[in-house]
Image (cartoon, helix red, strand yellow):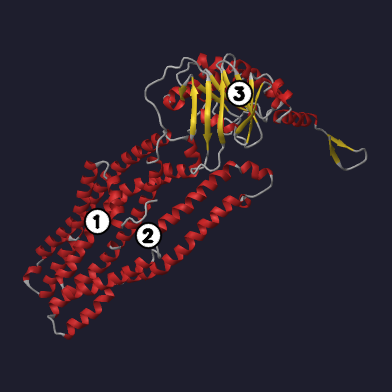
Amino acid sequence: MAMGLSRLDIIKRVLRISFSKPLLMFSSVFLAAASSLAYFIPYIVIYDLVKALLSGSGSASNAAILRMGLMAFAGSALSVLTYFGALILSHISAFDTSRDFRLSFADAISHLPLGFLISSGTGKEFGIMGSGIEQIQSFIAHKLPDLVISVLYPVVLIVLMLTVNLKYGLSMLAGILIAYFFHYRSMGAGGAKHMMELYYDALEEMENAAVECVRGITLLKTFGRSVCAYMTFNKAVSDYTGMVIPYTRNWEKHMCWFVTLMSNAYLFLIPAALYAIDRGIDPTENASDLVFYLILAPSAASIIPKIGRVMEEIMRVYENIERMDEFLLAPPMRESSAPERLDSHELRFSDVSFSYEENGTSKAISDISFAVPEGTVTAIVGPSGSGKSTISSLIARFWDVDHGTVTVGGKDIRDIPYDQLMSSISFVLQNEYIFTQSVRDNIKAGRQDASDVDVIRAARDANCHSFITSLPDGYETILKESGVFLSSGQLQRVALARAFLKDAPVIVLDEATASQDAENEALIRDALDRLTRNKTVIMIAHRLSSVINADQILVMDHGQIREQGTHEELLKKEGLYADMWKSYGRVLDWHINRKEGGSDDQTT
C-alpha cells in the first residue's frame, strides 16, 4: 500500500480513474454544478418574499407572490432535473468504466504467473473483480455528482450565510465547525484512510478463509465439524469483528454528537438573535434575516453531511484501486511475441533452481538437470515435498525459474509465446476442474474450434463416450464444478478427452489415476496408453506400479535428483528408490487380521 498520501493526492487519483470517459463525466459535472446552484434559488426567493411581507410594502401583492412562487418552483424543478441528468450521464460512464476495468484486470492477471495469483489468494482476486470494481462503479455513478455538489454547496451556502447577515452567518458557521470536530474524531486516531486499510485487510483475510472453508465443507461435514470449528475461518471472522466493532463504537459515539449538532444548527442562531434585539436593530430586517436562517439551517443539516459520506467513499474506492494496482502493476510474465520453430519436442532442465519465497532462502528444487528425449516417458518419484510437482509447474510456467533454463526443442520456454507453449503441452491432473457448462463444452476446453465429430472421437478415445450418451441430455448435460451425475473417475475421463482433443506433443501427468476404483483405473490407464503413444511424457507418480515401464525414472529428494535410471537399474542400486519400492510392496501386502475371539486389529 502506498503510504503518506494526502487526501488531495487520493482525490486526484480517484478523479483520474473516474474521468476515463471525459465527455460524459464533464457533462455530468456541469449538470451537477447547475443543480447545486439551482438548489438555492427557492431560498433566495423565499427570503425576498418574507422581507416584502414583513415590510408591509406594496411589493407583496398577489401577483408578486404568485410570481415568486413560480420562481421558487422553477428553481426546485431545475435542480431536480439537472441532478437527474447528471446521474444518467455518470451511470453510463460508470457502466463503461467498470466494463473496461474488468476486462483490463482479467487481461492483466492472464499475463501474470499463475504462482503469483495462487499466492495472492482467490478471495482477493474475487473481491476485486466483484465488490471492488462494483464500488468504483457505484462511486462514479452516484458519488461523483455528489462530490461536485458537496464542493459547490458549502461554497454557495457559506457565501449566503455571510452575505445576508454576518452575525447570524458566523453563529451558524460556528455550530457547523463544532459538529465537524466530532466528525473528525469519529475517524479514529489514524484517520479514515488508515481505518479503510485495516478494514480491507481484515475483509480480505476473511474472504480468503471463506473461499477455502466452502471448498473444504465436505471434509468438515465428514468429520462432523461445524463451520465455526474451522479454525482459520473462525480466526479470520474474529479478527474482522475485533477490528470493526471498536471502530464502529468509536464512530457511533462521536457521530451522535455530529448528527445532533447538525440537525439543531438553528439553536446557534439564538445568541445572535438576542444580541440583535439588545442592540435595537430594525425588528423587520432582523426578523426577515432570522426567518431566512431558520429555513436555511435544515438545508445545511442535509447538505453538509454529504461531504463526509463522499470522502469516506473516496477512501473506500482508493483502497480498492490500490489493491487492484497490486495486480495491474505487478511485473507480467516475460513473453515473446514471435513464434518459435520447434524442430523437436525434447524437454530439458539445465541447472534449474527455484524457490517459492521471494528471498529465495528455501529452495523447492536446486540445480537439477535432466533431459526427456522426444517420444519417451520420464517418471518423477520421491517423498512428499521433494519437488515433483514443482517441476511440472515450471514446465507450464506457473512460475519462472530463478536460475537455469527449461527448454522445449532446444528453445527456452520463456522465449516461446505462451499460447504456442500451451498448445504444445497437455496437462492431466489428479483433480481436474469442471466448468459449469455442458459435457461437450467441457471437452472442447481442449480445443475450442473442434467439431462435434472431433469431440465424440476424443470421448471414445478417453473411454467416456458410453456413459456420456447415458446422461439425461447426453453431451448437452450441464455439469457443475463438482460434476452432476458423474463420479470422480468419469470426471477424470472427461478431462482426458480434453487432452485427446488438444493432441499436444508433450504430456504432463500428475498422478491421473490416483484415488480411483479398480474399474475406473483400468479404463483411465487404457486411455492414457493411447494418449501418450509416441508423445514426450513427464509423469509425476505416487504409485510406483505406474512407473515400471518408464524409459527413465528420476528420484527426487529435498529438491534434488538423487537417483536416475530405469526401474531395474534403480532396484540394483539398492538406494532410495529400492527402499521406496520395498515400502510400496509392504503397502500392497497390507491387510487387517483379527484374532479369533479377540478385539484387536493387527497389520502385517
Near-viewer residue (599 or 468): 599
Q: Residue at x 37, y 41 (%)?
A: 329
Near-viewer residue (507 or 265): 507
Point out the tag, 2 or 1, that comes first from the N-terminus.
1
Query: Is disc 2 surrounded by few (<14), some (14 to 19) or many (20+) residues within 10 Å?
Result: some
Number of the front mark, 3 or 1: 3
Q: Amino acid at mark 1?
A: Ile
Residue 149's tag is 1
The Cα atoms of the two marked residues, 2 and 1, are separated by 21 Å
When the figure is inspected, residue 132 is found, relative to residue 64, above or below; the finding is above
Q: In terms of secondary structure, where does tag 1 sit?
A: helix
- Decide if residue 582 is in sight here: yes
Residue 204's tag is none
Q: Amino acid at mark 2?
A: Ala
When the figure is inspected, residue 157 is found, relative to residue 552, above or below; the finding is below
**Can you identify the residue that label 2 sits on?**
192
Q: Residue at x 50, y 56 (%)?
A: 240
Q: Amino acid at mark 3?
A: Arg
Query: Is disc 3 surrounded by few (<14), some (14 to 19) or many (20+) residues within 10 Å?
Result: many
Q: Residue 160: image x %, image y %?
A: 17, 66
The Cα atoms of the two marked residues, 2 and 3, are separated by 54 Å
Query: Is disc 1 surrounded by few (<14), some (14 to 19) or many (20+) residues within 10 Å?
Result: many
The Cα atoms of the two marked residues, 3 and 1, are separated by 61 Å
**Can you identify the residue that label 3 sits on?**
493
Number of the front mark, 2 or 1: 2
Point out the tag, 2 or 3, that comes first from the N-terminus.
2
Q: Is residue 495 left or right of residue 399?
A: right
Q: Residue 537: image x %, image y %?
A: 58, 21
Q: Residue at x 44, y 28 (%)?
A: 414
Q: Residue 136: image x %, image y %?
A: 35, 47
When the figure is inspected, residue 535 is found, relative to residue 150, above or below; the finding is above
